[in-house]
Image: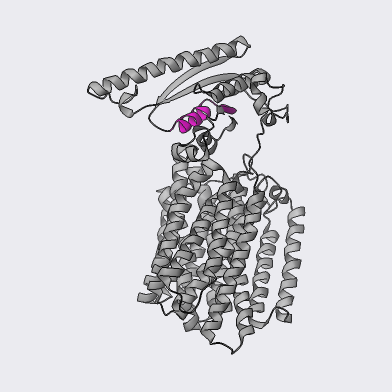
Amino acid sequence: MVLALIVLAQFMVVLDFSIVQIALPTMRVELGISLADSQWIVSAYGLTFAGFLLLSGRASDVYGRKRLFVIGLVVFATASLVGGLAPSEDVLIGARAVQGVGAAIASATGLTLLVVAFPEGRERNRALSVFAAVSSAAFAAGVILGGVLTSALGWRSIFFVNVPIGILAVIMATRFLAESRGNTSQKRLDLPGAIAVTGGLSLLVYGLTGAANKGLFALDTLTPLALSVLVLGGFLVIEHRANAPLMPLSFLRRGTVFTANALAILTIAAVSSMIFLLTIFLQQIQGYSALWAGLAFLPTALVFLSVGGYLSAKLVTRFGPKPVLLVGMVIQTVGFILISRLSVGTSYFSVLLPDMLIISLGAALSFTAFNIAALSGAKKGEEGLASGLINTSTQVGGPIGLAIAVTIVGVVVAGLGVSVSPSAATVEGFGYAFLGAASLSGIGIIFALLIRNPKPVVTALERPAPLLAPILPVFQAQDTSVSMNKILVAVDGSANGERAAAAAIGFAKDYHAQLEVLRVINTPSGVTPTGPRAVGANSTILEARYDSAQKEAETYVNSVVDKAKNTGVDATGTVLRTTGSPADEIAERAKKEGADLIVIGSRGLSAGGRLLLGSVSEGVVAHSIVKVLVVK
């Protein structure tokens, strides 16, 4: 019930982004909103969402996560009701801004409640997988539901639908959630920081909107742009001096954190502009209904669901975030260059859809990869900060991308004047805006090249034995104060497995640690000691084969244990037979035994081999909460 509740809230929050995009053209007509100003209906939500996300997470630690979660749901549902009843553009944009605050509170506390409710390990991983899948599905549902509701009941219904969902979620939260708090030793909240970053970004977007309406060098444009620079500069000063900063500046300088967050802003900025502009193009230039416009986005939503929700994570596990990000940004750049050829009569099926799919493929690959890269720079206890920061960057990217897009369109349309029809001028502006998105994606390629792989932090104290000479660059003594009590080495009899065993013995000797030598044998369920016994001649042969394999494994493990004991190391050996993933078994064993380090050899498969067969060592790295040293 806890998982269902948190997933329900997340579904509602994510749904509200795509569902509003489809209804924008209808809102513009009914309320008389210009193209440049209509982006505020999206941006007001994204800006307050981003500005109050980190603050909400900190406030929930101090005042109670259940309490803040319920408050967030109430604020979101109430603002949705006001948005549905809005008589004017100003009221609607105000309601969207308040919606963003409620979404920030509910989203920040919901994920924390999920982590608290599910114990670390497989249960939590499964819950987080459901959470991520629902987030992707909500976007796909939004483009369809937005079209259906707008066509059948009008644009106001897309806000009213949140009210009963919000009420249901509040009732469930009151009944099923337990109150919890985080570290409350520091109760001061960085409210000035939250206000400064939200105000500065709002001024930036307002200034760019002014450029679209009145020109880049008009006083009404330059004034808010200059003020945004001052306010955002003030935000940096506040964060530098604050006792409990909203965003510790030192954290941005660590590892891949800054690069990954920059990639998040660039990717979301480009993709948000595509959705915004194509929604206008399909409905107001080519005459699609809201329903058919929503269906036109369904293939791209499915790409995000499949590639972003499954394939990208597996590719990052096997190849690391850098190559996946690089390929994703290149594909996205190519897609935007192709779609910039847009004209009034562009065919959806032969031209527009293939270009949209290319962009979606690149963005979906990048989305999971930059999230993983952003979290890789976090130390234990900083996961919440890293997660909040990357979520903030994701929310900031949308408003910035929309502001840049409408500015480019406005400048192009003003430059063309009456030389072409209004529709042709607008579409030409869209083409230049897509080239702008391609430029953002191209900058993303540069950032992807700067992504660095995590470096080992646990290293040997003594010079490695000759056997380890080929991996000398990995073993650079860094911190002799590191304490290790238990080391687990996973062996498989391969050459690199031998090297891993030698390395682990060296570590155990250096740190006076216990050593466990582990060998995992993967077998069918019918021939495991704990599984039901299969019947038949073939099963008897298989049982005999795997029994023999286990005896061989035990002999090998015992030989490694003897080598360790001969050097004075306290060592034990274990052979496990499993029907599941060997990588999961190794990670679970290390966690259960309280190991401080896992040492494992890589079989040296090529990239293609890892893709087809999988890599146990990379699987351990991806799923273990214990530090891992891979010997290659």
Residue 425 placed where, x, y %? 56, 82
Q: How is colour applied across the structure in the image?
A: one colour
Residue 540 placed where, x, y %? 27, 20
Q: Is residue 40 above or below residue 233?
A: below
Name the residue rendered at 65%, 50% in the picture: 449
Q: Quadrant of residue 42?
A: bottom right
| Lateral position of residue 98 relative to residue 84, left or right | right
Name the residue rendered at 70%, 63% in the picture: 196
Q: Quadrant of residue 190?
A: bottom right
Q: Is residue 47 above or below residue 259?
A: below
Q: Is residue 78 above or below residue 188?
A: below
Q: Is residue 29 magenta?
A: no
Q: Nearer the viewer, residue 299 or 86?
A: 299
Q: Nearer the viewer, residue 501 or 185?
A: 501
Residue 627 in view, yes or no? yes
Name the residue rendered at 43%, 75% in the picture: 156
Q: Which part of the image, by quadrant, shows the C terminus?
A: top right
Count of numbered circles in the view: 0
**Magenta extent:** 581-599
Residue 559 placed where, x, y %? 52, 12
Residue 526 placed where, x, y %? 30, 26
Name the residue rendered at 49%, 62% in the picture: 74
Q: Give the residue at the far top of this rendering.
A: 566
Q: Give the residue at the far left of this rendering.
A: 536
Residue 49 in view, yes or no? no
